[in-house]
Amino acid sequence: MADTLQSTVVDRTAADARHRNDGAAAFGRRDHATIGYGTSLEIRIVYGDGCPVTLVLRGELDITSMWSFEEALGEVMAQRPSKLLFDLTECRFVSAQGYATMGRCSASTSVEVRSGSTHIASKVFATLGYDRVVSVRVHTAAHDRQP
């Protein structure tokens, strides 16, 4: 039996939130500073028959990318999934606000988080009080080699 997979990619970048500082021109200089607020975050949503809805995050989930994450998560949660998997193995940084948002999903569905090679996710969920309702699995390259 082949599972039918549907994938949606939501790509939100800091280019949407760039600010150009032209204050240097007021002082007679011709150079300008461009300040980027945050970095890019790519969110891939994978739906599969009999599988948890998976949100694969790549990049950084910080305060500047939270709106993208919350928007994508809101669309997923509106479908009332029975299980939700957050794949953070390609995410360079997750803010405490990001972990808290994932933890709050546990009020209405089963939540699992696949993190990189460190146990930071487990520690943050424990600090936030979600350690008994959010399952965290550490994913390493060795998992990819297993059959």
Image (cartoon, grey):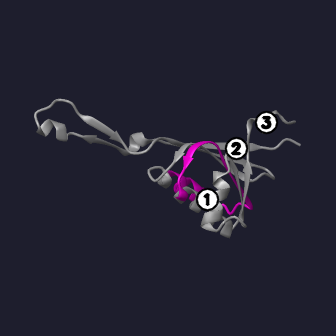
Q: Which class describes the residues within 10 Å of circle 2: few (<14), some (14-19), or many (20+)?
A: few
At horizontal 61% and vertical 64% (from top left) the residue drawn is: 127
- Amino acid type at circle 2 is Gln
* 101 on left or right of 65: right
Query: What is the spatial separation of the Cα atoms under label 1 and label 3, in whole angstroms?
Result: 24 Å
Q: Nearer the viewer, mark 2 or mark 1?
A: 1
Q: Which comes sooner in the sequence, label 1 or label 3?
A: 1
Assess whether mark 3 and mark 2 are in contact (beta carbons under 8 angstroms).
no
Q: Nearer the viewer, residue 100 or 53?
A: 100
Q: Residues within 10 Å of mark 3 (few under 14, many from 20)?
A: few
Give the mark, 2 or 3, whose residue is nearer the N terminus.
2
- Image quadrant where one finds the N terminus: top right
> What is the C-alpha distance between the residues marked 2 and 1?
31 Å
As for residue 13 lying within the magenta part, the answer is no
The part of the chain drawn in magenta is: 68-96
Element type at mark 2: strand
Residue 6 numbered mark, or none: 2
**Residue labelled with disc 3:** 142
